[in-house]
Amino acid sequence: MMTLDVFICQENISLYKKLLADPKISDSQRDLVAKMLAEEHDKLLNLFGPQALASDTSLQPESPD
């Protein structure tokens, strides 16, 4: 069920981005969440291929400011 897999990945990515934006998490928690975010991006790459991520900016990792 690819559609459900995509939805779950997108929701996880959204959650992980929110967690990374939280200034209250520790460095070790931030490292773990960043790793989980990268794994979700890899899952999407495996589902769609690199062209899908390149065309959908909502799925790309946010650049640190």
Image (cartoon, rainbow, N blue to C red):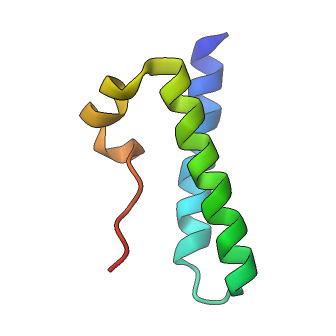
Q: Is residue 49 visible?
A: yes
Quadrant in the picture for the C terminus: bottom left
Q: Nearer the viewer, residue 54 or 58?
A: 54
Quadrant in the picture for the N terminus: top right
**In this image, 16 relative to 41: left or right?**
right
Percent across and percent down for residue 53 are 36, 34
Percent across and percent down for residue 2 are 61, 13
**Residue shown at 53%/20% (left/top)?**
47
Seen from this angle, which residue lies furthest top?
A: 1
**In this image, 17 relative to 36: left or right?**
left
**Residue shown at 41%/43% (left/top)?**
59
Percent across and percent down for residue 33 are 67, 64
Residue 11 picture quarter: top right
Residue 31 picture quarter: bottom right
Q: Is residue 36 above or below residue 2?
A: below
**How many numbered discs?**
0
**In this image, 62 relative to 38: left or right?**
left
Percent across and percent down for residue 45 are 49, 29
Q: Is residue 23 above or below residue 33?
A: below
Residue 15 picture quarter: bottom right
Q: Nearer the viewer, residue 37 or 16?
A: 37
Q: Is residue 10 visible?
A: no
**Residue shown at 74%/80% (left/top)?**
28
Q: Is residue 63 above or below residue 1?
A: below
